[in-house]
Amino acid sequence: MFRIVLITLLAGLFALPAQAREACTLDGFTITHLPEGLGTPSDFEYEWEDVTFHSRVWETTAGDATTVDLTLKTVRGDRIADLESLRDFLTEYHEKDPVTWDLTPTRLGSYGGYVTDGQAFYFVSPGVAAELTIDRSRYPQEALLATAEGFRPA
């Protein structure tokens, strides 16, 4: 009897959706919403131009191909003084043309930010921001926005 109960409990644990098994925080931010069907997560920490990134990346592997489903990042550094300095920093970081990068100002939760197809970022406070990207071939823009609303400081 005990063996059957244990096997049932273990089977139930592994049947949970991927997001229910993952940690619910990343670098002091709470993750309260994730789209269904994400692949395996990995965490990274790196720095560029005196700005530190903490990221969680979900990837799906099919055959020999691996695709990035979703990336959540915290962005921390003195260069991030306000929303416009965040936009300027990310324009440089992503090597975008500041004139042609099609960004739409928006509110993500209680934060001011920008969105474009498959990407969102927002300013939290001096030195702290967040950025998200999603695979638009698998997920609608609404999934990105819902995830952004659920990714906020704890």
Image (cartoon, rainbow, N blue to C red):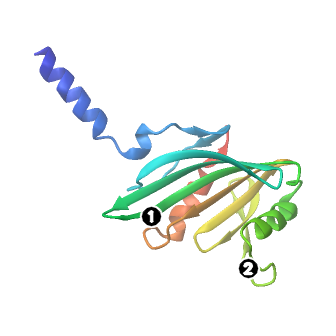
In screen coordinates, is 100 left or right of 147?
right
Q: Residues within 10 Å of mark 1 (few under 14, many from 20)?
A: few
Q: Position of residue 52 (x, y in %)?
A: 75, 47
- Residue that appears at 74% across and 76% down: 96
Determine which of the numbered discs, if any, sits on residue 67 in the image.
Answer: 1
Q: Position of residue 42 (x, y in %)?
A: 51, 46
Q: Position of residue 117 (x, y in %)?
A: 60, 74
- Residue nearest the viewer, comparing 117 with 43: 43
In screen coordinates, is 101 left or right of 56?
right
Sequence order check: which comes first, mark 2 or mark 1?
A: 1
Determine which of the numbered discs, if any, sits on residue 104 in the image.
Answer: none
In screen coordinates, is 14 left or right of 101?
left
Local secondary structure at mark 2: loop
Determine which of the numbered discs, if any, sits on residue 101 in the image.
Answer: 2
User: In the figure, residue 99 lies in which quadrant?
Assistant: bottom right
- Residue that appears at 66% across and 64% down: 120
Identified by mark 2, the residue type is: Trp
Q: Give the quarter of the figure containing the N terminus.
A: top left
Local secondary structure at mark 1: strand
Identified by mark 1, the residue type is: Thr
User: In the figure, residue 14 lies in which quadrant?
Assistant: top left
Farthest residue in the bottom direction? Answer: 100
Relative height, residue 13 to residue 74 (above, below):
above
- Residue that appears at 72% across and 75% down: 103
